[in-house]
Image (cartoon, coloured by chain):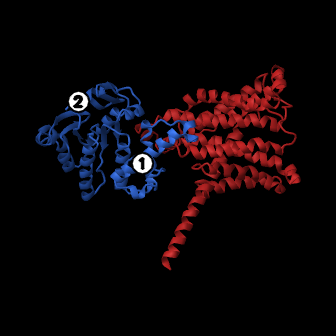
Amino acid sequence: MSIIIEVEQLSRNFGGLTAVKDVSFTVEEGEIFGLIGPNGAGKTTLFNLMTGITPVSKGTIKYKGHLLTGLPPFRIAAQGIGRTFQNIRLFKGLSALDNIKVAQHSRTVSGLISGIFGLSKCRLEEKRATEKAWKILNLVGLSDRAMELAANFSYGDQRRLEIGRALALDPNVLLLDEPAAGMNAAEKHSLTRFICEISEQFNLTLLLIEHHVPLVMNLCDRIAVLNFGELITIGSPAEVQKNPAVIEAYLGAE
Amino acid sequence: MEDFLQNNGFLLVTLTQQALLAISLYYPLMTGQLSVASPGFYAVGGYIAAIMGTIDFFAPWRAVLGWAIFPLEWLIAGLVSAVLAVLVGIPALRLRGIYLALATIAFVEILRVLCLNMEITGGAIGIFGVPQMFENRWSYIWVFGPLLIIMLLFTWRLEQTRVGRAFKAVREDEMAADCMGVNPTYFKVMAFVIGAVLAGVVGAMSAPFLNTWNARQGTFDASIAYLAYVLIGGSRSMWGPVMGAILLAALPEILRPLKDARLIINGLVLIIASIYLPQGIVGALQRLRIFMIRRVSSMSGGS
């Protein structure tokens, strides 16, 4: 096992508020790494820092030894870091198929002119992109509705489509921001299985923000707990569950 | 036929020209950017054609090239518009929504005031006697018509390609597109430049057509008119701006018997359309189609 993500002394201030403060951790290749903490602990901010949406105030993020800090989001995505969003950000006016084809952007090269004239190279590329998009739609179980607009999908299907879209990037690392939010028990259960399947099938390293405790405890190899932007502890699910600082963060001190 | 063209040729060419300008405004909108800079590039293109067609410096060129000077004018108008669009687009496209609209209005105004005060553009009087391409007005359909067909084919193809998908992804959700590997700035500037080049070329074709060119050609009024084309027609498909342009540009002619009252009707059409057709004519037609399909399928299902 080798280290794939290395976060060092990472901080981000919004004016006077420190959303993330001196956070350091490493993620091993193939690991499922959970990120938990009370509301406002800085979990999503951490994802935004890692994907380049929010600029870093201090500290570094390395991916396979290369520095990610300072790169724009599309370059980080092209290196193989995919993500989903807490509040689902699909391309709502595009079909499910096109949503997935957009995410293959950095793996394809057709330009304006070559695309319009349909040069044979581009036609082949387009054909492959479509085939791959169908494969992914099959995987997330939405292939029978490929031509429907993403806006018309149910909440659970939108979540699955968003994971499918991130998979189309050919990621090595996938950041899932509350994938089970708003799902019922049965949906959560099938989602857990689905996440296990894709992480093995695609040899993914997963970072997972989640509030649903059983899901996190079942899935994750290790868990990091954030509170008020600071990292309280990292450890196996069993260790984290027993940690008094974690209990205090969630329930308050006695 | 000859009579019809003599009487309506000017209108026919104008409709085609306005449809092209509406498409030039549709391009930035494909990436979700509300830019009304088209009249500025249209004015620049027209001045380039007018200057190349009239001043002494280009006299030997005109003598050697003959009719071929016109395509050369289009080419140069397109190139100048592209360079100007990159220079304006990169800073301006950092703005969003109404702020970008305001910045592009300012761009159009700056160009207008510049042209009003420069010697080479003929100041307030403008440039007269721009050489004609054809002997009559309606023949200009042979340049505007093919350009419209080319642009429709170009846009239709584009929407099915990687670049077209990137445009739409940026329109739908810029941040999500960024996180999926699409460089939003690059595609926003690209769409802006395509629209600018089109407006510039249309301007260069229009100067001979109108015979004269002056600072009244690219104004705030034109910005609003083109925006109305897109709003009335619909901004989600290329047919929207084309239909909007043809309808709104034809309306004053159709209502000519009403004399001054036609302006009231014109305004009413705008207001009614924006209330009852929020997605434009094309959006309304699409909804009507879905409604009809459902009606038909439910009827056949019931029997």
Marks 2 and 1: CB-CB under 8 Å?
A: no
Q: Amino acid at mark 2?
A: Ile
> Which picture quadrant has residue B278?
bottom right
| Quadrant assignment for the N terminus of chain A | top left
Q: Amino acid at mark 1?
A: Glu
> Which picture quadrant has residue A11?
top left
> Which picture quadrant has residue B26?
top right
Chain with colour red in the figure: B
For disc 1, the chain is A
Left or right of residue B90: residue B3: right
Q: Nearer the viewer, mark 2 or mark 1?
A: 1
The Cα–Cα distance between marks 2 and 1, rounded to whole angstroms, is 33 Å
Against B26, residue B282 (above or below) is: below
- Residue bearing the label numbered 2: A3
Give the colour of chain A: blue
Question: Of residues A156 and A198, which is closer to you in this image?
Answer: A198
Against A79, residue A155 (above or below) is: below
Q: Secondary structure at mark 2?
A: strand
Question: Of residues B76 and B39, which is closer to you in this image?
Answer: B76
* Residue A92 picture location, percent across and down: 45, 50
Against B146, residue B1 (above or below) is: below
Left or right of residue A25: residue A143: right
Left or right of residue A75: residue A19: left
- Residue bearing the label numbered 1: A131
Residue A213 is at least partly visible in this image: yes
